[in-house]
Every structure is written in structure tokens, then in C-alpha cells.
Amino acid sequence: MKRWFLVAGLLIGCLRLHAADSLDLTNKAWPAYWIAPQGVSLQDYGVYHFRRTFDLPAVPARFAIHVTGDNRYQLFVNGERVAWGPARGDLTHWRYETVDIASHLHAGKNVLAAVVWNDGPYKAIAQVTNETGFLLQADQLENAVVNSDKTWKYLIDTAYVPVPIAPDQITGYHAVAAHEKLDGHVYPWNWEKPDYDDSSWREAQRGSHGSPRDSRDGPNRWMLVPREIPAMEMTSASQWRLRKSNLGPWHTEGLDPKMPAIPASGFPITIPAGASLTYLLDRGELTTAFPELTLSGGKDAQVRLRYAETLFIRKGSRQGPADKGNRNDVEGKQFYGYEDILLPDGGENRVFAPRFWRTYRYIELDVTAGGEPVTISGLRDIYTGYPFHSAAQFATSDAGAQQDIEKILKTGFHTARLCAHETYMDCPYYEQLQYAGDARIQMMVSLYMTGDARLMRNGIALLNSSRTAEGATLSRAPSYLPQYIPPFSLWWIGMVHDYWMHVDDAAFVKEMLPGVQAVLSFYQHYQKPSGSLNRMPWWNYVDWVKAWPDGEAPAEADGSSSAELDLQLLLAYRWAAELESAFGSKALAGEYQAAADQLKTTILLTDWDTGRGLFADQPSHRTFSQHANTLAVLAHLLPADQARAVMEKTLSDKSLAQATIYYRAYVNAALREAGLGDRYLDQLGPWREMLADGLTTWAEWSGPDVRSDCHAWGASPNFEIFRTVAGIEPSAPGYALVRIAPNLGKLHDLRASVPHPKGTIEVELTLNDGKLTAHVKLPPGTPGEFIWQGQRRELHPGENQVTL
């Protein structure tokens, strides 16, 4: 085990290396072989080390390699970690990393070392797998000496044992891999270093050649494709605060009275032989990180690290604990969570770190010393996540509003970052799964806050490749456990359309058209002659409304689907019609538009309730919700004055089923469509309540019994503040045209900027005595329009001054 450092610039990712002496690794089988340990089941849990020693006469200018593993791997060059992965995908798109390791090599003896592990039956649901394996291929022919084959040696590491979450620690549905127990007595310390003696290691078992996706008759199930996203960020970010200790006056029994006072940070501290220590440590905010614990001595001690998003007030009647209260409070609360267990071997300055990152705000460190003292030198964490960097700014001279908006944007971006790693994920603590419904909102946050669309493109492609013969996508991808949420397939079409509008990448959008057609073909099998849907199979989740069983909108007893699904299908037909018109079949575009028009007519006839002036959830008009009316407004089913009236009632009528944090992204978007965008900032009460409750990320839903404290579908203000309040959005594909249509609400001025494919859009607005002055700067070659209270002005690339 070793300390991990960020090695900037090593992972080339989507940038393929091309040189005269490079091999064709795209269309032909690779010279390198998949390798594995011998004599063990390659589907079961196991941790394995591989090494390859080789000599170089001189340090080369370039030494590129392509590397991957199953389930996961870390690669070291002469003791330094240079890559880890692979970026999660599926077997038909198995990612490999490309790394130039020249700067880590030296003349003479060198060693490549990799740890590869298979979580077996304890793997995360997001982890697709074939079998345990490792593959390394030199990019240049003259460096073939390092290609993985039987010249590599391996060691089975018996120090690791999986630690699933204990039943009495479960606080909701969990889908992540087991944590781990590491026995330092049998761990091969310094195995990755050049001077380690591997003479007793065995020859690796050689499997099939590496096989790129485009090769003919690939000899194995891993269809290799290059990684298209950058390396994850790795940043030291420790900021511990000691909140509790058993060394305080509340617990001193059995402890040495000469024990030194507790340091302010808790470290360093020595626990005498036979004594115990329990620390409750608080980072001050939630994180996703690799915790690193450094200790010395302590042979036969036991060290436990437990991880929690927050503490709980009591055990609830539902599955797991409930009632979290203020997240900053610790008194009178209980700790529930995952744990790693460490058994020190007595060595000096041993650094223990899990092989995969953990999610936590609170860590409970529990140490029970054996026959000798154990010294804890420190606990640090290395933050990891997709390397998003904020490029958007928002400011106003209203000090109170500025503080409020700044907190909301900061918390939302932090939430979005913790839910973005090798894929987007619904939540980092419980599931780590890329659900289409969550991801569509997360993608919009990425576009507005960072302008980086690579993870979005990756997510769209992964969901597309999850489609089965019926045509629907899985609800989440990657996932080894199939789950279908048919409405999420429609949101997937929406994210393809979002990408088309915001990103100048028409070729990729065109690649997705067969998937769009397949999804709509799937839905057509369930449409009545009227266009509305019969009951759809599987889980027709809409939102976590407590009155809706399993989050499904109330449908008809005759087997008809809900208005919510009909409306989503209508939107999908319109998106698909635009995509087909631009890239595909004009005839098919016409069919989709005709289907959308028919659905519009049917919904107006069956679901519109004249008495209430609202859309019902079903033709019998048994129930009403914010959801159906929001979607109807977004689908432009009504003229402007009626749409405005519907949204007025949608906000004021509390008898309607209320949207949770997730669906408020759509409710608030409908305000803009109905001409009520000035009310947007007043709708952020639930977000302000979460801040008042001490959350540092947005929760899965509001309320005391919420499961996840970090759900990025709640980060919609991070694009809506820019899209609705500042009014910035594309009005043509690829952001070729910009629309600025602000909704200042109670603000009298603002300054905002958002990234654009060709640069930055900058907007400065001042409202004085009913007169609006706008200064707008658009990127080169990008014209646009400015709209304010029915007035329109053309904008040209560069500087614009508008007074209305």
C-alpha cells in the first residue's frame, strides 16, 4: 500500500497516439494477451498483483501503453501510480486507458506493477464484468517487451476479505460493492517497488489476445474501445474536525491516566497496549475520496473506519434509520454506515487506503490496541471525481440575494461533482448508478456550469448501448442487473436533443438516431388508435410522490397509462421529429410530428378538466398533480394565457400531488414557458430549507426520512438560474444562435456568464424605472436575439448594447 499522488497529464484518454511506429490497435487483434492468475475461479472475489521487470538502455522520449483490467485495476511504474480504471462501461464497449509512462522510467531496471481485483458476488450493480483479467499493450512495436503475456508474474493477495454492509447498518437500498478487511500481517508490502523480490511469484496464465471492438471475430467478450473521458481528479483535501472521543470525561474507564490530551485535529495520538480509541471525525462537508490512514506499531490491533453521510436521531419504522435532523449536530445521534477493517502488522508508517473511493462527511475511527501501542499519525483524504471546473458566474448588487444564490449555486455544483465520476450517478453513497432521469438534469448542470460535454456524451452512449431487442433502454447504465423504467427511455431522447442544441457535434447526434427510432418503435407497440398509451410494462416511475405507489402516476383501472406518460411520449415525438428532420428521414420526421399532434388532440379531449382548468392524471379525472400540468405546459398544449393560468394553479393549489426535488426541475422550467419566470427565485424554498438543515449537498427528496443526502437531480438551479433568471439558452442546434430572455424577478441587476462551444456568453443587465439596459457579449461567429416583455432585438457576435 502506498501514498497516491496526482500525476498530471499522464492519462491521454480519448486522445489516441499516432506515430509512424505505432501499431494498428483499432481493427486488428492486439499482440498482448489478457492474463490472469492460475488455479482460481475468475468469477469469484479475489485480489491479485502482477509484475513485469524489464531493462532499458536509456530513457525514451515516449513510451505509451494501453491498459485495462476486469473488474478494476491500478497500475504503477517504478512504484508510482500512473493509472487506475477502467472507466466503467459494458462488455461491448470495454474501456482501456492510454498512458505515456516515459517520465517514470529510467535507464536500467524498471518494473510495471498492477493490482487487479474482482469483487465477485460483492460487486457494485454498476460493475459489468466478464472475468478477472489484466491487459497491457505497448503502443510502439519496439516496446513490446512490456506486453502482457506469460512473462508477467502474479501473486494472489490473501490479505483482503470482503466486508458487505451489516444488516443492522442498512439505511436504505444499497447497490455499491462491499468494503474490505485488510490483514497487514500477510499483505505484500512494497510489492509495487522496483527492489521488491518477486522470485517466488508464479507465471501468469495467458488468455486470449486483446480484441478491439472493430476487429473481426474477437476472441473474447471484452470489446475494447479507448477511454473517451479524462482521468479523474485526485486532490488532497483533508479538513478534519474532531467532534467526539471516548477519551473525554464521558468515557475514561480502562484508559491510561497518563494518556496525552487530545490534539485539536485528533492526530497524532498513541493508544497504549490494551486500550481503545474512538473518534468521530467531521470533514464539514460531504466528499467522495480515498481516505488514507497512517499508523505505526500496533501489531494485533484492530482498526475500523466507518463512513456516513450524516448521523441519525432514531431508528425508523421504514427500512433503516430515519429522522436525520440538522446534519451539523452529533449529540444524541447514532452512527450507521459501511466500514473498512484494518489489522496492522506492527510496521512503521504503514499507509492504509481502500482500493476504491468512499463517500462520507463523518468517519468513525475505532482502534483497539493489542499487546503493543499503536500510533495514529494522521488521516487524510484524496478527493476524486470527474475533473469538472466551474466556468459560469452569477452576481447581483442585492447583497441578500447574492448570498442566497451563491450558496445555492455552490452547494449544487458540489452535489453535481460528487455525483460525477466515470459516469454520472444518482448518488455516491448508496447506488453509484447512472439513471437516465437523474442524468438528464446532471448533464444540463455540466453544460451550463462547465461547458464540458464529454461525460454527457459518454452517458448518452452508454444508455444507448443498453437497449435490448424491444428497443427500450435500461433505466440505468452500466448495470449488470437489468432494470427498465420506460419513461426514462423518453428522457434519453430528451438528452440527445439537449446535446444537439448545446454541443457542436452533429456526427454523434446522427449516430444516436437508430436508438431514438428504436425507443419510439417500442412505444408504438403500446399505443391505442387514439395515440394514448396502454399500460406500459415494468416500472413506470415518474416521481417520489408519497401518495403514488413506487412513484408511479395514477393510471386508469382499464389498463390505460397515465397522462404523464402520454405527455412524455408527446415531447419525445417532437424531439425526434426535429432530429430526423435535421439528420435522417423527412418522411419519418413527418410521422413523428403527426403522432405528436394526435397525442395533443387526445390529451386535450380526455385529460383536460374544464371545471378545474387543469389537466388530470387520467381520463376519469380521479387525481390531479403538478406533474401532468407541468408537462402539458412544456409541451405547449395550451395558448399562452391558458398556460399561464395553469401554472398559477399548479403553484397555488396544494390539493395537487406535489413534485419532489427531482421533478421541480420540470415544474420550474415550465414557469419560464408560461411567462412566469420572474417567480423562479421564489420557488427555491426547499433548497433553502436543506441549507438550514446543515446539508452540504442536495438530498434525494425533502423530509426527515430522506435516504440519500447527495442526489444531483436536485442541482437544477445550477442551470435554471442561468437559463431562466439570466435567460441564456441556445435557439439553434450546436448553440449556433443564442437567445437571451431574462426574468429578473425582484432583482434590479445581474451579471452572468456561461460557457459556449466557441467561448463565453456574458450578460450584464440593469433595470431602472422600468427601463432595461443590457450589455451582451457573444462568442465569435455567434449571433443571437434579446427578448424582453415581448420586445425583440437582434444580437451580433461580440459586444452588444440594448436598451428597452
Image: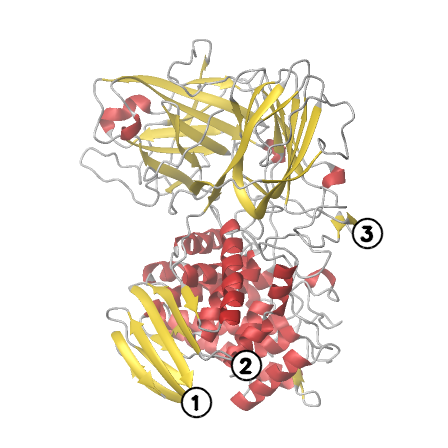
Q: Do the residues labelled 2 and 1 touch (CB within 8 Å)?
A: no
Please give the name of the residue rendered at 73% of the width and 40% of the height, measured from the top-left corner.
169
Q: Which of marks 2 and 1 is in front?
A: 1
Q: How crowded is mark 3: few (under 14 residues within 10 Å), some or many (20 or more)?
A: few
C-alpha distance separating marks 2 and 3: 47 Å
Where's residue 563, x and y in %?
64, 75
Residue 194, placed above or below residue 443:
above
**Distance between mark 2 and mark 1 Cα atoms:** 43 Å
Residue 401 vs residue 29: left or right? right
Q: Where is residue 318 in the image (x, y as percent from the top left)?
A: 78, 52
Residue lying furthest top in this view? Answer: 199
Task: Check disc 1: other Cα within 10 Å, few if <14, some if 14-19, many if 20+.
Answer: few
Read off the residue under disc 3.
Answer: 317
Q: In this view, does 203 lie to the left or right of 641?
A: left
Q: In this view, does 657 lie to the left or right of 268?
A: right
Circle 3: residue type: Ser
User: Residue at label 1?
Assistant: 770
Please tell me whether mark 3 sits on a helix, a strand or a loop: loop
Instruction: Tell me the residue that label 2 is attached to.
Output: 598
Q: Earlier in the sequence, mark 2 or mark 1?
A: 2
Can residue 629 be seen in this snapshot?
A: yes
Does residue 683 sit above or below 792 in this rendering? above
Of circles 1 and 3, the one toward us is: 1
Mark 1 to mark 3 CA distance (whole Å): 55 Å
Q: Which numbered disc flags the more N-terminal residue, 1 or 3?
A: 3
SS of the residue under disc 2: helix
**Amino acid at circle 1:** Gly
Q: In which quarter of the image is the C terminus?
A: bottom left
Q: Which numbered tag is attached to residue 681?
A: none
Q: Tell me residue 129's x, y (percent).
A: 52, 37
